[in-house]
Amino acid sequence: MNKPLIVQKFGGTSVGSIERIHVVAEHIIKAKENGNQVVVVVSAMSGETNRLLDLAYQIDKVPAARELDVLLSAGEQVSMALLAMTLNKLGYPSRSLTGAQANIITDAQHNDATIQHIDTQVIREILAADEIAIVAGFQGINEFGDITTLGRGGSDTSAVTLAGALQAEECQIYTDVDGIYTCDPRVVTCAVKLPVIDFPSMEEMARKGAKVLHLPSVQYAWKHNVPLRVLSTFNTNEGSLVKGHKSHQSVCGLAIQRDMYLIEFEAEHRQKLIDQCHMLGITIWSESEQNNVITVVIKQDAFAKLSLVVSDEFPIQRSKVSLLTAVGSGAPDLQQHACHSLRDEGIEVVDITLTSQSMMLVLLPECVDKAANILHDAYITIKNALDYQHEHLLFN
Ligand code: ADP
Ligand code: ASP
Ligand code: MG
């Protein structure tokens, strides 16, 4: 009988030094000793992708997208080789593969590619030889034979898609926190770990900036029923499972997205700007209009590309902002209360966008952490306490 197959992904902090790569190797060895076939996906060592990006920006603010992918994919290639060397040295035969060697075929959208297909034959051969397959995350190859990358945080998507293609028992995302919390636990220290979070809630959290999982990884796992778990490389705590197709919480969490620009321009140029964003693949996070002035929020790193094509044609004002989003079907109803609570604490809400599953606030960057704590206290900590009291009264 075939041994169970699991995919384990280790993020940048987890492979951030040779000592940490040893810790990662211990996890992999344990899974193998427990009778599993193991496929590993690695990110670049922490800080490495940013270092490479910075080198590119010293040459060109908008580097050629193809060359940027060649450059950035090198980060993962370093960690996969170091991990394979470590495992081989410890007596566990391992082979590392780039995205191209692992036959991860993507579309041609450099810097933000989508995986279209994985031919798993090479990986299966490695497993059949009782070796450990180590695959570079975040990268693939397009039909022209060019290296592509999947967007920042994309190694999660490599792992989940591999798990789907290999019909793995589980995809385990090892990272530097021990699960999925109601908000980034580095910002809201009283955030609560969710033992289970449903796919729609997790998708919305990831879409709005909760970078613990890359958005396409959640979407793929949801569509293809890949069991997906997030857990820590550095402790043995339980972790979180993403499971279930229905959201039950009225507010399940808060997501923060930093490094955004709010740009303003005259309404007559709206169509031109929207068309350009569309052509360049730039996501518009929010849009509003007042007194013939359009306000749009985009990522800061997208602005350089955009200004290259439109800034000579009409003036654009820009200012740095961050986004704070409450996720859940009850979130849109909180608009008035949230705005009042924040204003009472001296926090200006620059703009607000509602969807059926979220309330997204545009805030000044220096206010976002305080605002997250205020809203978390109001809608999650206190609400949970009340729910607990309610259950307690009912059942005792
Ligand atoms: P990796 O390099 O392992 O992929 P990331 O930095 O991409 O790690 O993602 C993990 C980080 O996500 C955590 O360190 C945490 O600060 C952040 N994060 C944001 N939102 C959440 C959340 N809701 N739950 C847990 N972590 C979160
Ligand atoms: N190394 C890439 C990044 O920093 C991909 C990843 O870590 O998932 O975005
Ligand atoms: Mg990540």
Image (cartoon, helix red, strand yellow):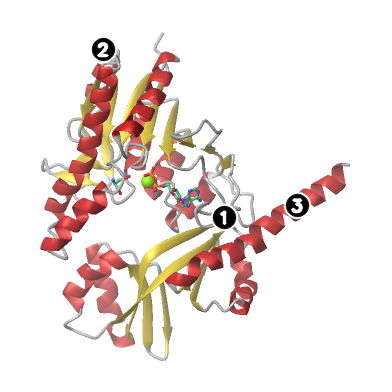
In depth, the one of 278 and 208 nearer the eye is 208
Q: Amino acid at mark 2?
A: Ala
Q: Give the residue furthest to the top.
A: 1
Which class describes the residues within 10 Å of circle 3: few (<14), some (14-19), or many (20+)? few
| CB contact under 8 Å: marks 3 and 1 | no
Quadrant of residue 56 in the image? Answer: bottom left
Whole-percent x, y for residue 24 in the image: 37, 29
Judged left or right of residue 236, residue 381 is right
Whole-percent x, y for residue 388 in the image: 76, 49
- Marks 1 and 2, the one that precedes in the sequence: 2
Asked whether residue 166 is in view, the answer is yes
- Marks 2 and 3, the one that precedes in the sequence: 2
Position above or below: 297 against 115: below
Position above or below: 389 against 76: below
Q: Which residue is mark 3?
A: 387
- Mark 1: secondary structure: strand
| CB contact under 8 Å: marks 2 and 3 | no
Disc 1 under 8 Å from ligand 1? The reply is yes
Position above or below: 311 against 44: below
* Distance in Å between CA atoms under marks 2 and 3: 53 Å
* Distance in Å between CA atoms under marks 1 and 2: 44 Å
* Residue at 59% across, 75% down: 339
Q: Amino acid at mark 1?
A: Gly
Q: Amino acid at mark 3?
A: Asp
Q: Which residue is mark 2?
A: 129
